């Protein structure tokens, strides 16, 4: 069984991020699964960057407590991460740059010397380190050269060849000097083609699959790569990506384009979303579909921009003034991100309401390999459902010659006419309105429209809500973990390790967060003798509060982490009595 | 051809003598003269007495939030750039709450027409001063007189990149019609600033006040000359109000510059399904 962690660290601004993705791609192209995680300060230069890749021959979506290969491009990397080394870990570094006194397995690569001999830029230390890493892991250097060639294809043959020398030198250096230490971990094996995606890439891909045509955003870590992905693809895929002046304009652009009939989405982190919420309420009363992507980071205010937290759950659920229905989804991993993103567009159209897809830095910026066949099969299954969006021949809601945009109906949903349809007109009104959209302040129409909008929730719960997934045996386990969103893979790994110790556990993972089917959800929490443990990356136990509000159930045991770091498998296990 | 009746929704609730009446009729007339119908045009309204026109004008419309009509209008235009899109807004709405949107819409040369009701006050909230109020203007929110100097909507939009900036006076319906028409016909971001007395809350900028201070630009005026336009626009700082097209120029619009919209509108395009083109980037 292959299961190891490679970590590269160095000063910010020296290409650590790019190097990490290349490593993840080599691993997946060699037939393995990966999950990676990056730590970086909110700086462009200086500070410490660390990129770790967990490689395994079975699917992974968690980090390992130990590091097997630690590549130090500076001394700080060693100091910061040495506590995670084991006696068999290898440490790659340059003895000309710093010394390590501890008894460890050293793989000395003369970065400095190679750079000066080959006249390389300091950033090419990464390239040497990649060559050395592939060498020590028994990987295929040609695969690495192929990836680098693809990456620099636009820069021409000369740049590619220049980079090649650094790869080859790093590779040869370890092959020559450390032939006894080669760990044949990355030996190419057959395996399904895999995509190396971040949660943000998965949201972008899901949006393309769902035929989203307008994406509007203002850059904000950790959501920005959705904007940059889609901006890069827009001409190819027939989408318009607008980087607007602020988040208020962002959401109102999307409300305008959605009103005009195209699927539209916006994305931000908590702070940017805070600027959008007045307009979320506007989308609520005008019943204009919109998909909102939130990649959480620790707040309040500017908080810790490049770190992770699940602190905006209650804010999302209750966002917007006034009472209006919305749906909140929280994917647990990349596969769920693709599925739930595409579903979010269908839900927004069917129920004509805002649908929030909530992620966090840990899910949004970590890469996880996804089998391409999963995407292909999802694409072939996925049906676009635009609900009651209608064109000219389908107009039936007419009274006294007027089309009734907000006609009362059994399911709460009324036909939505594409503007420009000849012979009709209507207004989407942010004021309370009567059925044809005109403003009203009368009591009965107000009650009717509030009830109509609320009914859409009932219809959603009946037709499209999904109960949490239960992993493990709920009936037979005394221990029940409960979490939502990105902590999924971590809790599942804890379950696996517990099972090795013959401890059974169940795990209730929510990804359809709000609204909840209260009666059915209550049934999951009615076993008095069970030990329910809430696992959340925030300090309030926000999902626990929501569950209490909705069902009356209160958690006695909580594992909450709010230092900006993801929860670890080991913490979860430690939480249990021995 | 559509008639005034076709465009007329509920009866207006504006105060008798309000400048909005003239603007409301001018908008309908302009649309009729341009051959538009309530089904062919998109209108976005801000919040204020001006925005209340949403109930009086038939069109595919959004009655937006205060200040947000412009980004809504931009979104509609991006989705369907063949549809004429107008934003009907007030001075507090567009120069105050939504000021940032106005600046950036100018920069983007989005092909929408912004019709601003400029009366110097917030009428719907009972007369607090607006960003266009003259310095020292006394109102409920500025009892000792407003400390800030007024916004110059003409200079602001011209220098921010608007390609059509006009000014008219609500008391002159014929001229207002012609300015709105020219604004809608202009390809690019157009602003029509309409000077409008608020008979209830603004006792300074009355019909008499404007009649003494407005004048029409004559034919010798070079509206395409940027420097001339900026200079002309500064006259309002001295309470002289030129009426007419202050500035007009040709530049590619936002949607003109998008390759993906070259052949079709966004809403008219076929769904993209060649997902291999995207997935291959991640292997």
Image: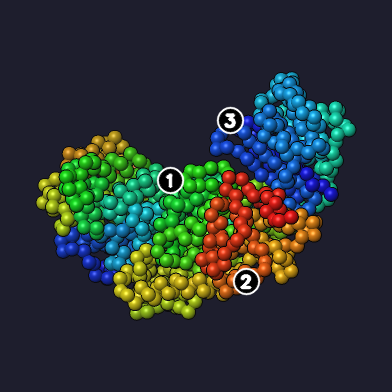
Q: Which marked residue is nearer to the observer: mark 1 or mark 3?
A: 3
Q: Which image quadrant for residue A93? A: top right
Numbered circle sitting on residue A46: 3
Q: Secondary structure at mark 2?
A: loop
Q: Residue at x 61, y 57 (%)?
A: A558
Disc 3 packing (10 Å; few <14; some 14–19; many ≥20): few
Residue A104: x %, y % from top left: 79, 31
**Horizontal relation, residue A429 to residue A331: left or right:** left
Q: Between marks 1 and 3, how big is the CA–CA gap? A: 29 Å
The Cα–Cα distance between marks 2 and 3, rounded to whole angstroms, is 52 Å
Which residue corresponds to the image point at 37% horizontal and 54% vertical from the top-left? B68
Q: Tag 2: Cα neighbours inside 10 Å, few (<14), some, or many (≥20)?
A: few
The answer to whether the residues at label 1 and label 3 have Cβ atoms under 8 Å apart is no
Q: Nearer the viewer, residue B59 or A464?
A: A464
**Residue A418 visible to the viewer:** no
| Nearest to N terminus: mark 2 or mark 3 | 3
Q: Which residue is mark 2?
A: A526
Q: Are marks 2 and 3 on the same chain?
A: yes
Chain letter belonging to callout 2: A
| Left/right of residue A330 with respect to residue B141 in the rendered view | right
Question: Which residue carries the number 1 mark?
Answer: A245
Image location (x, y in percent) of residue B149: 23, 40
State which chain disc 1 sits on: A
């Amino acid at each position: 069984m292959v299961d190891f962690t490679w970590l590269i660290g160095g000063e910010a601004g020296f290409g650590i991020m790019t190097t990490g993705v290349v490593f993840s791609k080599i691993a997946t192209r060699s037939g393995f699964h990966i999950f990676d995680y990056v730590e970086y300060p909110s700086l462009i230069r200086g500070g410490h960057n660390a990129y770790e890749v967990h490689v395994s021959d079975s699917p992974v979506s968690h980090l390992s407590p130990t590091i097997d290969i630690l590549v130090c491009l500076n001394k700080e990397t060693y100091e910061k991460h040495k506590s995670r080394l084991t006696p068999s870990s290898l440490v790659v570094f340059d003895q000309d740059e710093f010394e390590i006194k501890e008894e460890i397995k050293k793989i000395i690569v003369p970065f400095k010397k190679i750079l000066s001999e080959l006249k390389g830029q300091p950033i090419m230390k990464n390239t040497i380190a990649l060559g050395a890493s592939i060498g020590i892991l028994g990987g295929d250097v040609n695969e690495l050269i192929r990836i680098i060639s693809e990456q620099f294809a636009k820069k021409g043959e000369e740049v590619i060849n220049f980079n090649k020398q650094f790869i080859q030198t790093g590779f040869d250096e370890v092959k020559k000097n450390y032939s006894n230490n080669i760990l044949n971990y990355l030996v190419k094996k057959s395996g399904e083609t895999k995509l190396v995606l971040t949660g943000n890439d998965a949201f972008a891909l899901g949006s393309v699959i769902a035929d989203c045509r307008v994406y509007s955003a203002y850059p904000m870590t950790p959501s920005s790569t959705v904007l940059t992905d889609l901006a890069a693809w827009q001409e190819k895929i027939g989408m318009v990506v607008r980087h607007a002046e602020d988040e208020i304009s962002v959401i109102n652009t999307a409300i305008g384009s959605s009103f005009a009939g195209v699927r539209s989405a916006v994305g931000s982190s908590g702070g940017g979303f805070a600027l959008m919420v007045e307009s979320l309420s506007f989308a609520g009363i005008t019943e204009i579909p919109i998909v909102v992507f939130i990649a959480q980071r620790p707040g309040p205010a500017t908080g810790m921009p490049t770190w992770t937290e699940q602190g905006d759950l209650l804010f999302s659920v209750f966002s917007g003034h006034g009472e209006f229905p919305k749906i909140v989804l929280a994917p647990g991993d990349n596969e769920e991100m693709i599925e739930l993103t595409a579903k979010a567009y269908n839900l927004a159209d069917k129920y004509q309401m805002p649908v929030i897809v909530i992620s966090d830095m840990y899910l949004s910026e970590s890469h996880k390999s996804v089998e391409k066949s999963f995407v292909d099969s999802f694409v072939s299954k996925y049906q676009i459902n635009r609900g009651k969006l209608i064109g000219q021949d389908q107009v039936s809601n007419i009274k006294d010659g007027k089309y009734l945009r907000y006609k009362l109906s059994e399911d709460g949903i009324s036909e939505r006419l594409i503007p420009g349809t000849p012979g009709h007109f209507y207004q989407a009104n942010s004021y309370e309105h009567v059925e044809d959209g005109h403003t009203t302040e009368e009591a009965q129409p107000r009650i009717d429209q509030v009830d109509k909008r609320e009914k859409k929730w009932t219809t959603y719960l009946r037709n499209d809500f999904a109960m949490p997934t239960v992993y493990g045996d709920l009936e037979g386990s005394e221990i029940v973990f409960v979490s939502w969103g990105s902590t999924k893979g971590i809790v599942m790994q804890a379950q696996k390790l517990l099972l090795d110790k013959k401890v059974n556990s169940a795990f209730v993972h929510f990804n359809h967060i709000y609204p909840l089917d209260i009666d059915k959800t209550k049934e999951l929490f009615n076993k008095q003798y069970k030990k329910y443990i809430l696992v959340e990356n925030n300090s309030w136990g926000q999902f626990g509060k929501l569950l209490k509000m909705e069902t009356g159930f209160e958690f006695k045991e909580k594992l909450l982490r709010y230092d900006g770091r993801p929860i670890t498998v080991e913490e979860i296990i430690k939480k249990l009595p021995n | 051809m559509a008639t005034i009746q076709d465009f007329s929704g509920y009866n207006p609730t504006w105060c008798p003598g309000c400048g909005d009446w003239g603007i409301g009729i001018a908008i309908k007339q302009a649309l009729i003269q341009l051959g538009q119908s309530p089904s062919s045009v998109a209108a976005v309204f801000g919040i204020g007495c001006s925005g209340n026109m949403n109930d009086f004008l038939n069109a595919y419309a959004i009655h937006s939030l205060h200040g947000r009509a412009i980004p809504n209008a931009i979104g509609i235009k991006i989705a369907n750039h063949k549809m004429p899109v107008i934003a009907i807004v007030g001075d507090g709405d567009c120069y105050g709450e939504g000021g940032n949107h106005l600046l950036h819409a100018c920069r983007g040369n989005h092909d929408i027409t912004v019709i601003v009701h400029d009366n110097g006050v917030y009428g719907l909230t009972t007369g607090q001063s607006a960003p266009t109020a003259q310095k020292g203007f006394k109102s409920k929110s500025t009892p000792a007189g407003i400390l800030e100097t007024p916004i110059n909507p003409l200079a602001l939009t011209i220098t921010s990149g608007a390609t059509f900036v006009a000014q008219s006076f609500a008391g002159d319906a014929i001229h207002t019609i012609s300015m709105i028409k020219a604004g809608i016909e202009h390809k690019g971001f157009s602003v029509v600033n309409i000077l409008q007395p608020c008979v209830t809350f603004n006792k300074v900028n009355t019909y008499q006040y404007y009649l003494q201070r407005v004048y029409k630009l004559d034919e010798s005026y070079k509206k395409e000359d940027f420097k001339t336009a900026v200079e002309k626009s500064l006259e309002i700082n001295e309470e002289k109000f030129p009426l007419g097209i202050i500035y007009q120029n040709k530049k590619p619009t936002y949607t003109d510059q998008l390759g993906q919209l070259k052949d079709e509108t966004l809403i008219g395009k076929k769904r993209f399904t060649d997902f291999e083109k995207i997935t291959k980037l991640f292997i």
